[in-house]
């Protein structure tokens, strides 16, 4: 049997959409709504929407892609993963609906010209902190002390979000553009945590090879160093130290990628897309180190290497894989998703060209945004009907 196939075939009986199914596990609402938001908000930004007086221009765009889109996917993924790790019932029903409403309200508040920025700041911060509290509850009930740090990743993400708003209002002595980068670095830490947990495991399953074991010290380093760099950006840590954190992080992750890699992964799109996203995140963090010391003009390339190539590509790959398994379907990738991966790779290349070649900037932004939107739009089109229906194999979650 193909190792990428589920052990249970899905039921052939038709399934009807239901709120019960949609709110049965964290990945369902947040993968779907996050994908829709990513597609629509990127297009809005690229083709003329300039934010609001409270959250203007690039600040709206950066804020919504980091703490809006990435926040949704991270919360959906972590709540699904923690349910698997602990064996506890997943967050569902009213509690999950509360998180969804908070997230949606924050997106509306951030785009509404009639509301002050503090409304979005409070809504999105409560969303992230409440999601962290729910994670902590599950882990404490299961006494999984080795994973107690996971909710603190969301707490750190919420702290970077609050710091951004305080900087935007002039309440702290930090440039809000700098604080946007702190949010990106916190997401990078989450990506490295996810990758350390799953990439070697998925590779060994797909190619029937031996799993490479990652030491606890290595995992701690690749999570902690980007977080130290994020805090250092706000605190005004000297650039050489920030570069040291960035380049050390990149070196450790590049070494890890080399250890995990098996060329047979190229035969499995759901696997190579994760490698590509992890590699882009690694490269982007390394570029941060260079940009902060000897190449200031490279800061946009560093930012978008992480956000488009890392966050965008890796989250799409993770969403397509985990949503198949958790909706009771065989782990066989729909052809439309291979196309979506291609559009995301194109979006990454085009956005980097726009950052590096000034004459290509406007055209690069527009075409990269279209490719990005098509990639996530294809996910919403293909997976949306599955995410709002009960599992195909009849299991409760």
Image (cartoon, grey):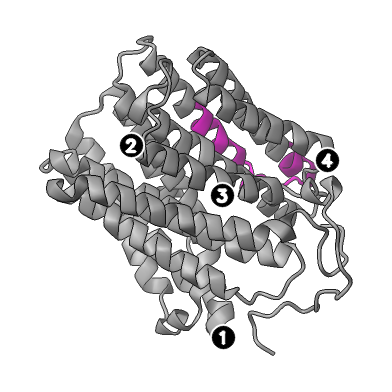
Residue identified by numbered label 1: 208
Residue at 80 percent across and 79 percent down: it is: 9
The spot of residue 169 in percent (x, y) is: 39, 11
First reached walking from the N terminus: tag 2 or tag 4? 4
Location of the C terminus by quadrant is: bottom right
Magenta span has 153? yes
Could you classify mark 2 by the number of other residues whose Cα lies within 10 Å: few (under 14), some (14-19), or many (20 or more)? many
Marks 2 and 3, Cα distance to the nearest angstrom? 29 Å
First reached walking from the N terminus: tag 1 or tag 2? 1
The spot of residue 233 in percent (x, y) is: 30, 29
First reached walking from the N terminus: tag 3 or tag 4? 3
Residue identified by numbered label 2: 229
Relative to 343, is 132 on the left or the right?
A: right
Do tag 2 and tag 4 residues touch (Cβ < 8 Å)?
Answer: no
Furthest toward the left, the residue is 294
Q: Find the magenta span and give its range.
A: 137-159
């Amino acid at each position: 049997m193909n190792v990428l196939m589920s052990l249970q075939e899905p039921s052939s009986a038709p399934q009807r959409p239901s709120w019960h199914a949609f709110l049965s596990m964290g990945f369902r609402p947040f993968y779907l709504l996050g994908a829709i938001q990513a597609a629509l908000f990127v297009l809005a930004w690229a083709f003329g929407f300039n934010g609001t007086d409270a959250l203007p221009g690039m600040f709206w765009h950066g804020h919504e892609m980091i703490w809006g889109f990435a926040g949704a996917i991270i919360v959906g993924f972590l709540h699904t993963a923690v349910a698997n790790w602990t064996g506890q019932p997943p967050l569902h029903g009213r509690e999950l609906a509360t998180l969804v409403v908070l997230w949606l309200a924050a997106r509306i508040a951030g785009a509404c010209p009639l509301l002050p920025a503090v409304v979005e700041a409070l809504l999105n911060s409560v969303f992230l902190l409440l999601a962290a509290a729910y994670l902590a509850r599950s882990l404490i009930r299961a006494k999984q002390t080795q994973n107690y740090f996971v909710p603190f990743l969301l707490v750190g993400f919420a702290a970077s979000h609050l710091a951004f708003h305080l900087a935007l209002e002039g309440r702290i002595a930090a440039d809000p553009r700098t604080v946007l980068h702190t949010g990106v670095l916190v997401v990078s830490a989450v990506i490295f945590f996810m990758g350390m947990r799953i990439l070697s495991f998925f590779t060994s399953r797909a190619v029937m090879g031996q799993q490479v074991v990652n030491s606890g010290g290595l995992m701690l380093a690749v999570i902690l160093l980007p977080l130290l760099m994020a805090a250092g950006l706000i605190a005004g840590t000297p650039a050489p130290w920030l570069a040291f954190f960035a380049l050390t992080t990149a070196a450790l992750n590049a070494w890890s990628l080399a250890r995990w890699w098996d060329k047979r992964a190229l035969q499995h799109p759901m696997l190579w897309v994760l490698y590509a996203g992890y590699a882009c995140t690694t490269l982007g963090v390394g570029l941060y180190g260079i940009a902060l010391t000897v190449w200031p003009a490279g800061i946009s390339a560093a930012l978008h290497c992480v956000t488009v190539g890392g966050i965008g590509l890796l989250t799409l790959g993770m969403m397509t894989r985990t949503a198949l398994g958790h909706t009771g379907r065989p782990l066989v990738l729909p052809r439309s998703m291979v196309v979506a991966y291609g559009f995301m790779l194109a979006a990454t290349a085009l956005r980097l060209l726009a950052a590096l070649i000034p004459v290509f900037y406007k055209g690069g932004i527009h075409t990269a945004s279209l490719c990005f939107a098509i990639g996530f739009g294809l996910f919403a089109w293909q997976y949306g009907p599955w995410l709002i229906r009960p599992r195909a194999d009849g299991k409760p979650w």
